[in-house]
Each structure stands twice: as C-alpha cells, then as structure tokens.
Image (cartoon, rainbow, N blue to C red):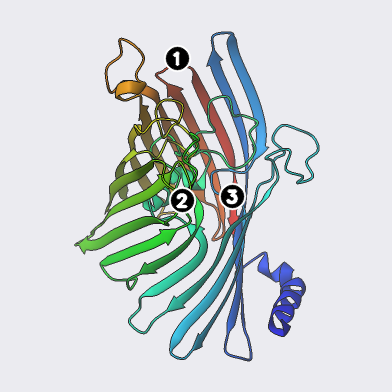
C-alpha cells in the first residue's frame, strides 16, 4: 500500500512532464514505474444511402484505437521478471446526446478498463500473462490493420455511435476483444513464437447456450524472417469453446475458429493479407449473436468467414504512409436455417468496405490521419455509406 501511494503521488506531481514523453521512474526497491498512452480525436462525416434518401451525420469522436492511459510497474525477484499493467481506455464522444455522466444509459464517454494483468518472465525468456488483455484469436489481424491508427468503417447508420469506431471489425476480421486469460508465450524476439491460453468462456448471444463449465482455449503462432531487404511475418491462430444449454445434461456444442495471415515489407512497400473461418462464433463482435440457427434453440452452428488485403507505401523516410485496403465478413444461413428455396450456404449477412488513408508522422509523438471509407452490404436493401475522417493522434 505504501508503494502504491508513492507511485500515485509521483504521477500527480509529474503529470505535465508525462504529457511530452513517456514517464519512467526508478524506485528505491529496484522496481520501475512507467506511465504512457495516447489521445486521439477525429472529425468523422458519414453519408448513408437509404431507400428513404441520403442521411448525413457529423461527429467529433475517438477512432478505432481508444485513448489509452497505461500504468506499469516492473521488478525482478528470485530470478523472475515480474510486472503489473493497468490500461484505461476512455472515449471522448457522448453518443449523440448532450449530457453523459457515465451512468450506463449511453455508450458514450465511457472509461473502459481494458487491461489489468500481471506478467511472470522466466530465465529462458518465456512468459505467463494472467489477467485482462487482448485475446489471441484474431489478434494479429487487428494489430496489422492500418485503420487501427485511424477510423475505418463506423458501421452503417452508426455516425453518432458511442465507443470506438469499427475499423475493419466485421469488415475483414472478428474482434478478439479484451478478455480474462492465463496465457503462456515462448521467448519473444526469436523468429518463431507460440502463445496459448485459457480464457473466460462466453455465453452465446443467440440464447439458450449459457452454461460454460470449462475455459475457452485460444492459440497463436507467429514467424518472422528476413531475406536481404525483404522482411516477412506469417501468423496463424485458433480458438475452441464448449457451451451447454443446461447446468447438467442438456446439449453441448463446440465453437471453433481459425485465422492466418502474412505481412511482407519490400523496400518502401508493405503488403498484408489475412483471413479467418469460424463456426459458432457469430460475426463482427464474437459470441454476440447468430452463432446458432433456429433462434438459438437448435444445435446447428452457423459458419462465418472473411478477410482483408492491404497495401501501404511509406514515403518521406517513413514519415508519411499512404495505404489502401479492402475486406469483407460473411455469416451463412446453413442448411435448416436457410429460408425455403435458398441454397444451403446462402449468406445471412455479407458486408465489405474499401478504405484509403494518409498517415503522417508530424512530430516524433504527433500523427495526422486522413481517411475515406465506403462500406456496404450485399443483403436486404443493400445500403451503402461513405465515411470521411481527419484527426490527430498523440502518443506519449
């Protein structure tokens, strides 16, 4: 408690200095304390084409990456590297209303406690991470997405939405989200790294399947290599979860997914291609609905797939990057869930988006971002929406 009090006092006293650079303090007991993060603000204009006519909207909001304030303490005891990490991720907008006081009635300027975890580093370089952190399945898909430093898609009709924007979530990959986990990773900094963890299991948004007796399992493998001036990274990941319809007996179903991708750096050009498949995962936000056919009462799991391709050119000694990407996400009806007369694999939903962006490192810490996105659906009324955005990202 005494150490925590000293850390909080130090942060309060040195806050102005932390605004210009990452704050690192060495404690008398050998531990170090770090404060870092980012603030981003975007103007986003959306224009939606609907059957009733065009609808436009403006918003001043957070992008795909939320504002972050991260606090970390590290020390070494008994030959192990120990650490704790806290990451607060607030947004700035009020979801289209004037007043928002964090009472839970609006998903606007919330403080999202995304990260709370401890780490145990061993002599061989491997590590255990225990707590709340980004999931493994689909992690690289979002980390390599250029719209992580911008806005990307905001969701059709979501111009005044709360929370972060979508980026390519639901338009090329399923969101891994931040989840409670215990994950083991082999040594970092080597060509190949393996991570595998047990996770807090999720009830299915389709309903009925709400009992989870064993943890979800997620895994990821990455491989980095260099050949001359060309660098490349290959990754693959997997997920499995079992969910039951009753505490004892009942029906048990298994959800699973697989993902893979490659990133290649050739001189000033970076190319990323990734994809995923799933069964019983839903789409967009994982386990949030439509995982099971028949209004969630059956045993047939809907399948999903998607992916994206991205090209970026880095000019001005890497200070300015120009990028373009395209991606899609699809959820299928499947067999008994298909309406009469439809094929067995007709899509329940199929959305896609194109994004072009300019990302300029104005100073060492300040980034300027300009993006344009067209998002659309091939289902129903087939709506389309254009999103134009510009803003600042300041990392410290």
The numbered disc on residue 57 is none
Residue placed at 38% from the left, 69% from the top?
184
Q: Check contact, mark 2 vs mark 1: CB within 8 A.
A: no
User: If you read the primary sequence from the N terminus, does the residue marked by circle 2 or circle 3 appear first?
Assistant: 3
Quadrant location, the N terminus:
bottom right
Out of 284 and 15, give the one closest to the viewer.
284
Could you say which is closer to the camera, residue 18 or residue 79? 79
Q: CA gap, disc 1 to disc 3?
A: 32 Å
- In the rendering, at what x and y percent does residue 102 appear? 75, 46
Residue 347 in picture, x, y percent from top left: 35, 23
Tell me the SS state at disc 2: loop
Residue position marked by numbered label 1 in the rendering: 380
Q: Residue at x 40, y 32 (%)?
A: 292
Q: Give the residue displayed 47% in from the left and 43% down from the top.
A: 246
Please give the label number shown on residue 212.
2
Name which of mark 1 and mark 3 comes first in the sequence: 3
**Residue 169 visible, this orientation:** yes
**Label 2 neighbourhood size at 10 Å, few (<14), some (14-19), many (20+)?**
many
């Amino acid at each position: 408690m005494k150490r925590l009090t000293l850390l909080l006092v130090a942060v309060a006293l040195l806050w102005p200095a932390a605004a210009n650079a990452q704050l690192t303090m060495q404690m008398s007991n050998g531990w170090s304390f770090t404060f870092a993060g980012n603030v981003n603000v975007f103007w986003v204009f959306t224009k939606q084409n609907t059957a009733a006519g065009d609808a436009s909207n403006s918003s001043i909001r957070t992008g795909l990456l939320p504002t972050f304030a991260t606090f970390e303490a590290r020390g070494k005891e008994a030959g192990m590297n120990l650490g704790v990490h806290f990451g607060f991720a607030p947004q700035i907008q009020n979801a289209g209303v004037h007043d928002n006081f964090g009472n839970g009635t609006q998903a606007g300027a919330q403080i999202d406690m995304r990260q709370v975890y401890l780490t145990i580093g061993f002599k061989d370089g491997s590590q255990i991470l225990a707590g709340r952190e980004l999931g493994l399945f689909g992690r690289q898909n979002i980390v390599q997405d250029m719209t992580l430093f911008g806005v990307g898609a905001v969701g059709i009709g979501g111009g005044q939405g709360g929370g972060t924007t979508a980026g390519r979530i639901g338009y090329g990959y399923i969101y891994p989200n931040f989840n409670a986990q215990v994950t083991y990773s082999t040594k970092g900094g080597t060509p190949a790294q393996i991570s595998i963890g047990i996770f807090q299991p999720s009830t299915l948004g389709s309903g009925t399947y709400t009992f989870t007796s064993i943890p979800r399992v997620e895994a990821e493998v990455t491989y980095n290599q260099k050949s001359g001036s060309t660098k490349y990274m290959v990754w693959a990941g997997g997920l499995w979860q079992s969910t039951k319809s009753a505490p004892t007996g009942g029906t048990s179903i298994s959800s699973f997914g697989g993902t893979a991708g490659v990133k290649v750096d050739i001189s000033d050009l970076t190319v990323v291609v990734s994809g995923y498949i799933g069964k019983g995962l839903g789409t967009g936000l994982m386990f949030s609905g439509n995982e099971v056919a028949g209004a969630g009462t059956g045993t047939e799991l809907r399948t999903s797939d998607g992916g994206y391709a991205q090209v970026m050119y880095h000019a001005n000694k890497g200070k300015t990057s120009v990028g373009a990407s395209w991606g899609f996400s699809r959820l299928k009806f499947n067999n008994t869930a298909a309406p009469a007369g439809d094929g067995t694999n007709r899509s329940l939903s199929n959305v896609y988006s194109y994004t072009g962006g300019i990302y300029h490192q104005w100073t060492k810490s300040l980034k300027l971002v300009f993006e344009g996105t067209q998002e659309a659906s091939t289902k129903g009324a087939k709506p389309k929406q254009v999103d134009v955005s510009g803003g600042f990202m300041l990392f410290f």
